[in-house]
Amino acid sequence: FMGGLIKAATKIVPAAYCAITKKC
């Protein structure tokens, strides 16, 4: 379960960072 959670986070974090900072 934790492995899947980490895998999802690695995809979500860059997208959120991009949206917040407008740096893509």
Image (cartoon, rainbow, N blue to C red):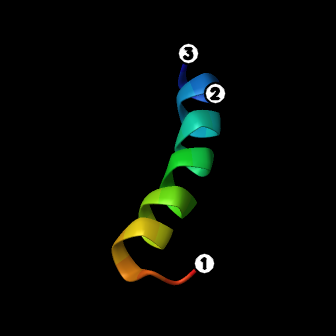
**3 and 2 marks in contact (CB < 8 Å):** yes
Give the class, few, some or many, for how many residues have Cα within 10 Å of label 2's Cα (few <14, many ≥20): few
Q: Earlier in the sequence, mark 1 or mark 2?
A: 2
Describe the element under mark 2 as helix, strand or loop: helix
Mark positioned earlier in the residue sequence (3 or 1): 3
* Residue linked to disc 3: 1
Q: Which residue is mark 2?
A: 3
- Residue drawn at point x = 39 percent, y = 81 percent: 21
Q: In the image, residue 23 lies at what x, y percent? A: 52, 84
Can you tell which of label 1 and label 2 is closer to the viewer?
1
Which quadrant would the C terminus be assigned to in this image? bottom right
Q: Residues within 10 Å of mark 1 (few under 14, many from 20)?
A: few
**Residue 20 versus residue 22 in the image, above or below:** above
Work out which quarter of the rendered image holds the N terminus and state it.
top right
In the image, 9 versus 1, the foreground residue is: 9
Residue at image position (61%, 49%) is 10
Residue type, mark 1 in image:
Cys
Which amino acid is tagged 3?
A: Phe
Q: Nearer the viewer, residue 15 or 7?
A: 15
Q: Nearer the observer, disc 3 or disc 1?
A: 1
Q: Secondary structure at mark 3?
A: loop
Residue denoted by label 1: 24
Identify the amino acid type marked 2: Gly
